[in-house]
Image: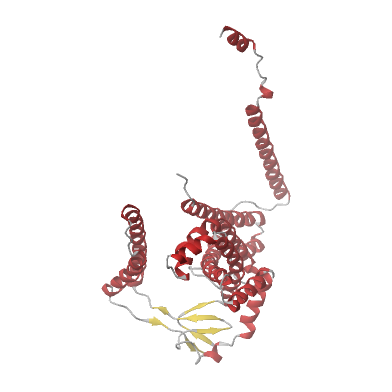
């Protein structure tokens, strides 16, 4: 014991520069410091150059009158609005097409991916041709082709005035015209009731899962949720006076009046993003299903499950663990690819910023706004998908 103590006492101390922990921290501090100095140099150099050329910097221009119109907006805007409002319209338009594109591409991609695994040779080949065609042609070309088809191949409003679906829905080269409900307070309350129904359905689902884990008894969660999402808004609709008034598009001169219109640029962008991204989603879904061991399918069919039940109850729940991570990348891609809207004239964020830069000369500020906007949306999608991925991950006991 005395020999060990003496040996320990006389052991040479490790110099700080040889300590791997201290050395690692020192390198990290050095790298961060150098990066900070580089950023500071670039910012200061940029400000000096702007001042030398007498170019104003800052975001004061956001409160000035924009002076230009935006043809497609779902929030209030006019040429008298500020540049900040114009940029907000662009952000809303980008989010609108991105969210709808994500939902539609997921549904269509899942169907095509499952179709590629079908035992029906014709269906499988059609899905394969679809995937290969859209995956191997640049998205920009598809957007230009779809936009050109809508503008030049579809008939004008006067040509389809008496050929609409149910005499209320009209597809023309000026957009898709659809009927909308007339303004009534009941519609807002119905929307609130639908949100409440979703919350109750989520709580019922958690309770049903805990009940099944404890007793083994299943609860009809899907039917309950369907009843809530339909029944609760219906009750509110009845209590609100059961409004049924619709604003239906009617031909007035050279165009339709009334109802609502989805602009051709929006339709072209949404269709292009959906078709293009769904081809990649289809391959992700197909590979995820194939990653599940074939024995799972055989065991499920051995106990009498139909092919649809095997896919819905056995294969897809297990395949999700493989599908979700690459799907995150596709959701990010569909959001960033929406910036190609400028090529077909859709007024997204990039288009609004471009006009703002041309009129104000605030190029650096405009580009920073675009970067921050896309970064915020992308990080939000990543956080949500990572949270969902952890929820469905296998938990080791």
Q: Residue furthest top?
A: 2
**Residue at 65% across, 79% down:** 148
- The one of 253 and 382 positioned closer to us in this rendering: 382
Q: Whole-percent x and y of residue 146?
A: 63, 77
Q: Whole-percent x and y of residue 384?
A: 50, 54
Number of numbered callouts drawn = 0
Report whether residue 69 is seen.
no
Left or right of 324 on screen, residue 355: right
Q: Residue furthest left?
A: 239
- The one of 64 and 116 positioned closer to us in this rendering: 116
Report whether residue 220 is seen.
yes
**Residue at 38% across, 78% down:** 182
**Residue at 66% across, 22% down:** 16
Q: Residue furthest front?
A: 302
Could you say which quadrant of the image residue 397 lies in? top left
Q: Whole-percent x and y of residue 51?
A: 70, 48
**Residue at 49% across, 70% down:** 74
Could you say which quadrant of the image residue 119 lies in? bottom right
Q: Whole-percent x and y of residue 6?
A: 61, 8
Left or right of 391 on screen, residue 335: right
Image height of 338 relative to 161, above or below: above
Image height of 242 relative to 316, above or below: below
Left or right of 242 on screen, residue 149: right
């Amino acid at each position: 014991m005395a020999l060990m103590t003496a040996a320990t006492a006389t052991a040479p101390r490790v110099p700080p520069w040889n300590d791997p922990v201290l050395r690692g921290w020192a390198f990290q501090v050095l790298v961060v410091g150098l990066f900070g100095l580089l950023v500071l140099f670039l910012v200061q150099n940029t400000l000096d150059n702007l001042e030398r050329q007498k170019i104003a910097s800052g975001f004061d221009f956001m409160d000035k009158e924009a002076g230009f119109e935006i043809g497609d907006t779902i929030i209030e805007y006019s040429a008298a609005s500020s540049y900040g409002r114009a940029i907000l319209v662009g952000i809303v338009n980008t989010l609108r097409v991105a969210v709808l594109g994500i939902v539609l591409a997921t549904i269509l991609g899942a169907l095509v991916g499952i179709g590629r695994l079908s035992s029906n040779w014709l269906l499988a080949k059609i899905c394969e041709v679809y995937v290969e065609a859209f995956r191997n042609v640049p998205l920009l070309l598809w957007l230009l082709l779809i936009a050109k088809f809508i503008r030049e191949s579809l008939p004008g409003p006067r040509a389809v005035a008496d050929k609409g679906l149910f005499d209320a829905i009209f597809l023309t080269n000026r957009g898709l015209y659809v009927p909308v409900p007339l303004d009534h307070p009941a519609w807002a309350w119905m929307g609130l009731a639908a949100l409440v129904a979703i919350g109750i359905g989520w709580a019922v689902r958690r309770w049903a899962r805990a009940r099944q884990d404890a007793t083994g008894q299943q609860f009809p969660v899907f039917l309950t949720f369907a009843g809530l999402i339909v029944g609760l808004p219906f009750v509110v609709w009845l209590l609100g006076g059961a409004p049924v008034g619709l604003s239906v598009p009617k031909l007035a001169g050279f165009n339709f009046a009334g109802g609502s219109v989805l602009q051709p640029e929006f339709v072209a962008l949404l269709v292009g993003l959906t078709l293009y991204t769904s081809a990649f989603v289809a391959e992700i879904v197909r590979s995820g299903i194939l990653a599940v061991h074939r024995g799972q399918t055989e065991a499920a069919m051995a106990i009498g499950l139909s092919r649809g039940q095997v896919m819905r109850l056995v294969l897809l729940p297990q395949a999700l663990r493989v599908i979700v991570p690459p799907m995150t990348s596709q959701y990010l891609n569909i959001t960033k690819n929406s910036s190609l809207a400028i090529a077909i004239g859709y007024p997204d964020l990039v288009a609004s910023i471009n006009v703002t830069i041309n009129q104000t000369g605030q190029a650096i500020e405009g580009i920073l706004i675009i970067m921050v906007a896309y970064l915020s949306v992308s990080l939000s999608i990543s956080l949500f998908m990572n949270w969902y991925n952890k929820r469905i991950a296998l938990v080791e006991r």
